[in-house]
Each structure stands twice: as structure tokens, then as C-alpha cells.
Amino acid sequence: MKTHLNKLLSSTCLSLVSLASIAAVLPEDRADALYHYYNGGGIQIDGPSLLVRKKVTGNISVSANYYIDSISSASIDVVTTASEYEEERTQMSLGVDYLNNDTIMSVSFTTSDENDYTANTMNFGISQEVFSGLTTITMGYGRGSDEVRRRGDDVFRADIDRRSYRLGISQVITRNFLVGFNYEAITDEGFLNNPYRTVRYVDSDPGNLLGYAYEPEIYPGTRTSNAASIRARYHLPYRAAIHGSYRYSTDTWDITAHTADIGYTHTFGDPWIVDISYRFYTQTKAGFYSDLFPFQQAQNFLARDKELSTYTDHSVTLAASYEFIKHGWNFIDKGSINLSYQRILFSYDDFRDLRATTPVGEEPLYDFEADVIQLFFSFWF
Amino acid sequence: MSHIFFRFLLAVTCVAMTACSVEPWVKPYERDRLADPIMFFDRNPVSSAYIDHVYEAREGARGATGSGGGGCGCN
């Protein structure tokens, strides 16, 4: 009797599982060629990014990305404490996705190199569709190893060990409504500060006309952050969509941040897709940040990196996409040309512009605007 | 005792695995709008990876963007 019951349970279970299985699909075969341009705060960065993804068998897809940042920097930090510089960062990635029924397993390797910094990162991920494809659960783990160097110093070498843990859920709510949740924990250990940056402190030496002097930054050797986000897209009664997201982030350096965005996607006929969106970001400063320390070596950890200060930024993005090969040509199924323009305004609450000649600590607060342009072609094959 | 435990384990496994078989409240033939590229969270991965990098290099917050994980190597 017990055996019969067990067999019944097993067979019922197996039959239900087979009914439940809805196969996932690999990403589309696609090639993208992008030119990116950033200009703001005295920094100009541009370069290409090439991304190709292709199925090599029915259940294996490979991807490769080649990316370059050509940097010309005369940022506020550089202008006030160092000299202008130019450099190039090259990043390459290789990834493999393996599909097994409704599960996709992924592994990728990314290497990034510039004259004073090298980073290597491995990422593993698994994605599982459940509830007849209405829910997709993803999990990921990343491990990174960086080497920090300093220009003009052949002896200096420092390492960083990075780990990240990701969990995501994508949920179909209705035939028009999609919601996604993501959580990520990142932990870093090693030399986490920029080897060139300095902090300033009040220097009451009468010979120092500035009234302040500089000393190197000192950061803690570890940092752990936790971030959780929710995002949603809703299809309107006509062919258009609205979308929004919110992210909460906090870390062991006492930085708490809120990110929110909202946008609208509109179509004009089949070929045109136009997006407009607004993004808001705000954060509190790190516990060891100060624009002006009261004296030299005022505390164990010292930072005056504006990215660790209290500040807000606002972004507005306009993007348009035009599909120009609708019925295929040769081995290409379709293609599109895409242009995006983004304007970002950064306003700092406790980072001052030292180019001004005012009494120490009374310099105007720093702000700047940045333009971000992307032009890219996409081909599906 | 071991039989009870085995049956309990089998039943729990069965329920957990067959959670996939709940009646889909959005039928496959009703998912045309969800399949439209305008409903994709990440319609252009090459673009979103770049924008993630732009913000990651200039903001203190990091992670939970929904991308597959990066490693921009930026200081």
C-alpha cells in the first residue's frame, strides 16, 4: 500500500512537472556597434563598444564585447591638485549561456586594463522560469581581482578582491504589466582609495597663503554594500509603454542612496521607437568624508572624493530608434539605428570649488553639467 | 518513521516542483504585448551596460541594476 502510494505520488509529480515545463529561450543573435561620448566637469570620454552574440548550437549562445574609453581629464580634482592627463581604458568580455529546458546557466569573464589599473572579473548566473513562464528567478555570483598602480611610481602595487551576490525576480502581473525585483550585495577588500587623490586640512601656518594644505586620502580596507530595486513597465492601450524604477542602497561607509526614474516609450508606426525619461539620484556622504578637515591627520580615515560627498544629480534622456531593414537582407534579419542624448546635472552639498579665491571653507559649492551621447547600429541575424 | 519522512519529503518536493504548473493567469496567446521590445527591461544591452558604467563611476551607490554583473575596473 505504501509502495503504491509512493508510486502514485511520484507519477503525479512527474506528470505535473512535465506539464509545467515551459522552455526558456536564449537571447537573440545580434551585433551592436556603439559610439559613446561623455563631456562634463572637465572630463571628456569617448570610444567604441562592439557587442556580438551568436548561438553556436541549439542550446549554447556565446557573446563577446570590446569596449574602449579614451579619457581626457581636467576635472576639478585634477585642476586643483594635479595636472591634466589623457589615458585609455580597454575592456573585453567573453560570455557563454547554456540553455537546458527552462533554465539558463551563464558564465562570463571581463578584463579591463589601463595604464594604472587592471581588473579581472568572473560572473556566474542561473536563470529559471517558473509558473508557466510568468516568473523568472535569477541568481548570480561575481568574483573580481583588481590591481591598482600609480603613474610615475614603479614600486607601488596594491590589490582589491571583489565579490558580488545577486538575486532577481521578474514577474508578469497582467498581459500589460511587468515587474522586476533585484537585490545585490557587493563586498570589496583591499586598497579601495584612489592613489592620486588628496584631502585638504586647515593649515594655519602664516607662510601658507591658501590657508589649507593637502595630505593623501586614507580609506578603510573593506566596503560592503547592499542594494535593492524594483522596476516596472506597463503597456498602454496603444503601442506605447510607461516605466519606472526605484533603488535603495546602503553600505558600511554610511553612504545611503536613493535612485528613481520614470519614462515613456512611444512608437510612430513600426519603425520608430522614441523614449523620454527622467532620473533622480541622491546620496549621503561617507562617514569619513569632509571637504575640509580641521587639522592634519584629523582621523583614521580621510576622504575628499566628491563621489563620497552628499549630493544630488538629475538626468533627462531623449532617445530614438529607427528600424531600417524590416524584411531582411542577405543573412541579416533586421537592423536599427539608435541615437540617445542625456543631460546630467550634478549638485554637491559639501564639496567646494577651490578655484574660487575666498576665505577657507567659504568657497562656493561645486556643481557641473554633463552631456552623454550614444549612437549605435544593431543587426539581428 | 522513515516512510512517513520519505512521503513528506516527496510531497513537499512535488508541491515545490509543481508550483510551476499553476494555471497561468496570463495565457501564452495573451503575451503579445509583453513580447513587444518596448516592454523589455533591457532592450539594448550594449547601451544599458554603458550607462550603468557612466553612473557607477560617478555615484556612490552600486548594484541591483538588473544587469548580469560587470566589473568596470574604475577608480
Image: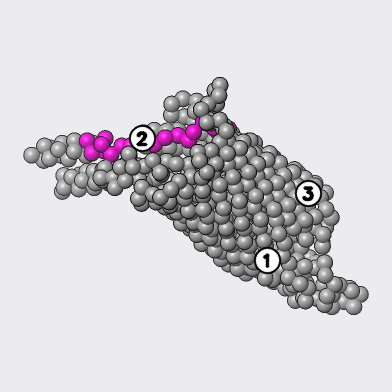
Residue at 26% across, 35% down: A18
Label ID, residue A23: 2
Q: Nearer the viewer, residue B14 or B48?
A: B48
Q: Nearer the viewer, residue A261 or A127?
A: A261
Residue A144 drawn at (x, y percent): 59, 46
Amino acid type at circle 2 is Ala
How busy is the neighbourhood of tag 3: few (under 14 within 10 Å), some, or many (20 plus)?
Answer: some
Sequence-wise first label, 1 or 3: 3
Quarter of the rendering containing residue A181: bottom left
How busy is the neighbourhood of tag 2: few (under 14 within 10 Å), some, or many (20 plus)?
Answer: some
Q: CA–CA distance between discs 3 and 2? A: 48 Å
* Residue placed furthest toward the left: A1
At mark 2, the secondary structure is: loop
Label ID, residue A347: 1
Quarter of the rendering containing residue A338: top right
Residue under circle 3?
A: A72
Amino acid type at circle 3 is Ser
Q: Is residue A70 visible?
A: yes
Sequence-wise first label, 3 or 2: 2
State the extent of the magenta-drawn residues as a range: A15-31
Residue A88 drawn at (x, y percent): 75, 43
Residue at 64% across, 52% down: A342
Q: Chain of mark 1?
A: A
Q: Are marks 2 and 1 in contact (CB under 8 Å)?
A: no
Residue A118 drawn at (x, y percent): 68, 44
Does B74 appear above or below A213?
above
Q: Is residue A223 visible?
A: no
